[in-house]
Amino acid sequence: MNYLFAPWRMTYISNSMKPEGCIFCDFPNSDKDDDHFILHRGQLSFIILNTFPYNSGHLMVAPYRHTGLYDDLTTDELLEINILGVKCLRMLRFLMNPEGFNMGINMGKVAGAGYADHVHLHIVPRWNGDTNFMPVITDTRVVPEALKETFAKFKHYWKNHES
C-alpha cells in the first residue's frame, strides 16, 4: 500500500489554521501581498490565490468592501470582479491549459462559504480525472504544485500580460 503524507492537512481540517477576522479585509490591508498570495489589486476588488485550494490554480476575486451579499455589490464592484474573473480565465488557460472551470459564489455558511461575511468569486481550473478517490475515501486533496510555485508563475504572467 502507498501512503501520501500531508501532515499540514490536519491543522486545516481541525480549523486551527483559519486566521482570526476576515482574510478578505485583513490581507489587503497589510503590505504582505506575496505572503498572502494577493496576485492583483484593482480599484474595488483584488485577486487572491486560495491557500486551501480545490485544485492547483484556485483563485478568488473579492471586493475590498466587507459584505456577505452578492446583491449588495455595487454595479462598479460587480463589473470589476467579473472583468478580473475573465482575466483570471485567460491566465489559467495560458499557463495551465485546463479542460474546464468551476466558477461560483458560495453565499452563506450553509452554502459552503468559508468566509460567509465577505462575498467572493471562486475560479477553479479543472482537468479530466482531477477528482479521484482521495477526497472521498481519505478526505485529502492532492494538489500537484506548491502554492509558491503557482503564485510565482501567476505573478510573472500578470506582470507581462494583464497589468
Image (spheres, helix red, strand yellow):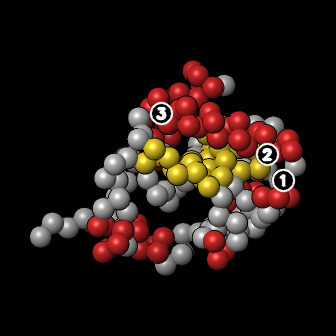
User: Residue 54, position in %: x, y?
Assistant: 46, 58
- Rendered view: 161 above or below 5: above
Q: Amino acid at mark 3?
A: Arg
In the rendered view, tell whether residue 152 sits above or below residue 17: above
Please tell me which residue is depicted at 54% across the width and 75% down the height of the picture. 16
Measured as percent of width and height from the top left, residue 11 is found at 46, 73
Quadrant of res 5? bottom left
CA gap between label 1 and label 2 equals: 6 Å
Q: Secondary structure at mark 3?
A: helix
Amino acid type assigned to the residue bearing label 1 in the image: Leu
- Asked whether the beta carbons under mark 2 and mark 3 sit within 8 Å of each other, the answer is no
User: Could you tell which of marks 2 and 3 lies nearer the N-terminus?
Assistant: 2
Question: Where is the C terminus found, in terms of image quarters?
Answer: top right
Residue 36 visible? The answer is no
Residue beneath the point at 77% across and 50% down:
63
Badge 1, how many Cα within 10 Å: few under 14, some, many 20+?
Answer: some
Question: From mark 1 to mark 3, how far is it between C-alphas?
Answer: 28 Å
- Asked if one can make out residue 122 in the rendered structure from this viewpoint, the answer is yes
Residue placed most toward the observer, 149 or 91: 91
**Mark 2 is on which residue type?**
Leu
Q: Secondary structure at mark 2?
A: helix
Instruction: Indicate the secondary structure of the residue bearing disc 1.
Output: loop
Q: Position of residue 154 (x, y in %)?
A: 52, 35
Packing grade of label 3 (10 A; few <14, some 14-19, many >=20) is some
Say the numbered circle drawn on residue 93: 3
What residue is drawn where x is 64% and y is 68%? 113
- Does residue 40 appear left or right of residue 76 in this picture? left
Query: Disc 1 marks which residue?
Result: 73
Residue 94 position, x and y percent, is 47, 29
Viewport quadrant of the N terminus: bottom left
| Circle 2 residue | 78
Q: Are marks 1 and 2 in contact (CB under 8 Å)?
A: yes
